[in-house]
Amino acid sequence: MQSKRKSGPTNPLVANLILSLKKTARENESGVWKSISQSLEKPRRRRVETNLSKIARHTSKNDQVVIAGKVLATGELQHAVTIAALGFSTKAKTKIEAVKGRAISIEKLMEENPKGSGIRILK
C-alpha cells in the first residue's frame, strides 16, 4: 500500500501564510484573501512572476496590488503603487521605492486592509 504524499507547499512560511489568509478571509468574508491563498497553494512551478511593466499597465496612482508570487524588475513604474508579493527582486524593490511606491509583504497588507477592499490581484 502506498502512503499518501503531503500536498501543498513544504515551505513552512508559505504554509503559515496560507493558513492566515484563509482565516482572515473567513473572518472578514473577503474573497480577495481566499483567492490569494488558492493561488499560493498551487505548485511552485506554476507560481506567478510579474514584471513591473505589467504592473504599470494595469494600475493607476495609489492602487494596492497583490501578486501571489515574485515581482521582477523588467520595465518601469511611472506612478506610486503599493505592491504586496511573496518576493521581490532587489532591482524591482529599488525601482518601486524610487517612484515613492511601497514594496511590502502580503502579511503586512493583510494587517493593513483585512477586508481586502480596493485591492487588485495581478497574475
Image (cartoon, rainbow, N blue to C red):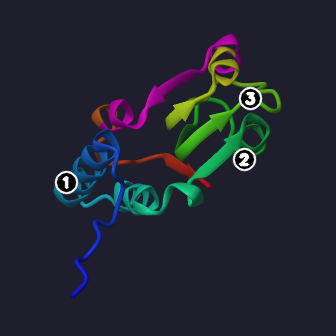
The answer to whether residue 84 shows anywhere in this view is: no
The Cα atoms of the two marked residues, 2 and 1, are separated by 29 Å
64 in the magenta segment: no
Residue 101 against residue 87 in the figure, above or below: above
Quadrant assignment, res 54: top right
The answer to whether residue 14 shows anywhere in this view is: yes
Q: Nearer the viewer, mark 2 or mark 1?
A: 1
What amino acid does circle 1 point to?
Answer: Lys
Q: Nearer the viewer, mark 3 or mark 2?
A: 3
- For the point 38% across and 34% down, the residue is 109
Q: Secondary structure at mark 1?
A: helix
Q: Dot 3: within a 10 Å radius of its alpha carbon, few (fewer than 14), some, or many (20 or more) residues? A: some
Residue that mark 2 sits on: 58
The Cα atoms of the two marked residues, 3 and 2, are separated by 16 Å
Magenta range = 95-110
Residue that mark 1 sits on: 23
103 in the magenta segment: yes
Residue 15 locus on image (x, y percent): 29, 49
What amino acid does circle 3 point to?
Answer: Ala
> Which circle's residue, 3 or 1, is located before the other in the chain?
1
What amino acid does circle 2 point to?
Answer: His
Q: Is residue 24 left or right of residue 107?
A: left
Report the quarter where the N terminus lies: bottom left
- For the point 48% across and 46% down, the residue is 119
Residue that mark 3 sits on: 73
Residue 80 locus on image (x, y percent): 65, 23
Q: Dot 1: within a 10 Å radius of its alpha carbon, few (fewer than 14), some, or many (20 or more) residues? A: some
Q: Nearer the viewer, mark 3 or mark 1?
A: 3
Q: Dot 2: within a 10 Å radius of its alpha carbon, few (fewer than 14), some, or many (20 or more) residues? A: few
Q: Secondary structure at mark 3?
A: loop
Residue 87 locus on image (x, y percent): 52, 33
Farthest-out residue, right? 75
